């Protein structure tokens, strides 16, 4: 569903909304269905482009897939077609969807071999796969890379447990190595592992399938390999990135929004980070209420210096929300430094916000200083193109608050991560249409 959004800004969002299932978790647990011949049932699957493309890819690989509604799906990987992995169709589909790289760990564990093309995905900077292959080789796999075809392959006659210290706390790298290790002989110790809620959910699912994993939720995972895994039922948690995006939309439009079933216990530092931006939140059970606020003031440090909002490995702030924090700061009172440590191209969308009247200094590829307008000046409507999922949503938030009618092209990028976003925002009072 590519195309264009037309947004008439200046309308406060009001009402309640429920977040979709977590995109990043879905990509991991869908790949985990390859680990068993038995049926796996996954519920609360987000109906978004990236996830639907991965489900189609699994079907092309020979996995039996049948839907029980839009958000619940049955998978049975009894007859996986490994020859398909050498076809041009596989290379085309897999290279267009970065999250599909997590098929490698399950394939290696179950069949002793896996193949993968150079992945695509968001153009937000260098996103290497070295950590994945380092882990596979420590488990006993042989790695090969065809530079001519940009095609990776890993093969192993026998996977064995190992002590692995990751060079970075990669979320997808941890997931891939974890899924390879659950059926390796002996014990694997995975240190500096990512411990995001997505990984905790993947561990929960693997344990339900019969895996033996200790240390879930920490950066030290201990995995004792088993001979085989069985089927299970799994429900995906709410998407914390969507929850943060809705908080930002409510604040920027001075709306009154309640986020239902937000998965509050899994949000970590996210609510506190928004409160430090001056945004009032009321947590009631598993709901978050953002009351209408005509102004919000950014905190400063005790010595009066400008506050820094930076990404960090979990339980630090997820990098996927920094674009939202940046755009929210444009209408706050005060200033903030946004420090995007992980990706060197993720802040380049700020030129669009500057065109809209935001006061932003791009210090370097990783840092931007935002001087809030405190609503004294409304952002101006403009025509934009969405460069990636998270920047696209940040531009959408800016357009919702701007004066006049904005146009956002290449909205396929937004559709990759947010289901029916135009319809759901229209239900809250946004004036938005898809062209």
Image (cartoon, grey):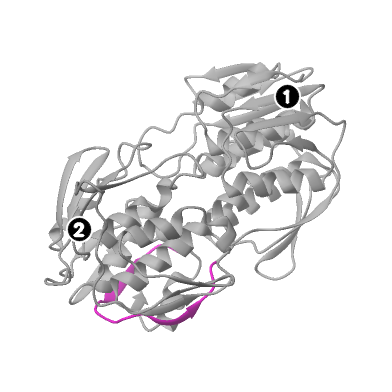
User: At x 81% / y 48%, what residue is drawn?
Assistant: 208
Q: Is residue 62 visible?
A: no
User: Count the marks: how many?
Assistant: 2
Query: Among all residues in the image, which is located at the extreme front?
Result: 302
- Rendering coords of residue 64 (x, y %): 78, 52
Relative side of 233 to 325, left or right: right
User: At x 29% / y 70%, what residue is drawn?
Assistant: 252
Q: Is residue 115 visible?
A: yes
Secondary element type, mark 1? strand
Dot 2: within a 10 Å radius of its alpha carbon, few (fewer than 14), some, or many (20 or more) residues? many
- Dot 2 corresponds to which residue? 353
Secondary element type, mark 2? helix
Quadrant hosting residue 78? top right
Residue bounds of the magenta highlight: 1-19
Q: Is residue 12 magenta?
A: yes
- Rendering coords of residue 1 (x, y %): 46, 64
- Dot 1 corresponds to which residue? 188
């Amino acid at each position: 569903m590519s195309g264009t959004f037309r947004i008439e800004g200046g309308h406060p969002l009001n009402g309640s909304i429920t977040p979709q299932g977590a995109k990043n978790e879905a990509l991991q647990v869908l790949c985990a269905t390859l680990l068993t011949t038995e049926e796996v049932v996954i519920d609360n699957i987000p109906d978004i482009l990236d996830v639907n493309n991965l489900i189609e890819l699994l079907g092309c690989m020979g996995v039996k897939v049948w839907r029980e509604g839009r958000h619940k799906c049955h998978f049975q990987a009894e007859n996986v077609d490994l020859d398909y992995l050498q076809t041009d169709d596989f290379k085309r589909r897999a290279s267009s969807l970065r999250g599909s790289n997590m098929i490698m760990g399950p394939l290696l564990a179950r069949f002793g071999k896996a193949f993968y093309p150079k992945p695509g995905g968001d153009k937000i900077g260098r996103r290497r796969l070295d950590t994945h292959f380092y882990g596979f080789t420590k488990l006993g796999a042989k790695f090969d890379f065809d530079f001519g075809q940009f095609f990776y392959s890993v093969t192993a006659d026998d996977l064995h447990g190992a002590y692995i210290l990751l060079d970075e706390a990669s979320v997808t790298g941890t997931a891939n190595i974890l899924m390879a290790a659950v059926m390796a002989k002996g014990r694997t110790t995975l240190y500096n592992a990512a411990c995001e809620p997505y990984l905790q959910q993947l561990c929960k699912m693997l344990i339900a399938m019969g895996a033996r994993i200790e240390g879930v939720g920490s950066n030290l995972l201990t995995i004792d390999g088993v001979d085989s895994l069985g089927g299970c039922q799994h429900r995906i948690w709410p998407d914390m990135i969507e929850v943060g995006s809705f908080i930002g939309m409510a604040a920027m439009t001075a709306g009154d929004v309640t986020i239902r079933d937000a998965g509050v216990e899994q949000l970590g530092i996210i609510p506190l980070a928004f409160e430090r931006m001056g945004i009032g939140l009321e947590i009631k059970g598993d709901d978050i209420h953002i009351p209408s606020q005509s102004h919000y003031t950014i905190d400063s440090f005790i010595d009066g210096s400008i506050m820094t909002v930076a990404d960090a490995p979990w339980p630090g702030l997820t990098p996927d929300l920094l674009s939202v924090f940046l755009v929210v700061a444009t209408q706050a009172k005060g200033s903030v430094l946004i420090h995007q440590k992980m990706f060197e191209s993720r802040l380049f969308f700020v030129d669009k916000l500057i065109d809209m009247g935001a006061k932003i200094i791009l210090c370097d590829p990783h840092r931007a200083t935002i001087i809030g307008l405190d609503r004294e000046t409304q952002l101006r409507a403009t025509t934009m193109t969405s460069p990636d999922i998270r920047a696209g949503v940040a531009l959408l938030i800016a357009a919702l608050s701007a004066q006049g009618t904005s146009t956002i092209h290449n909205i396929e990028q937004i559709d990759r991560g947010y289901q029916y976003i135009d319809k759901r925002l229209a239900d809250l009072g946004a004036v938005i249409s898809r062209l």
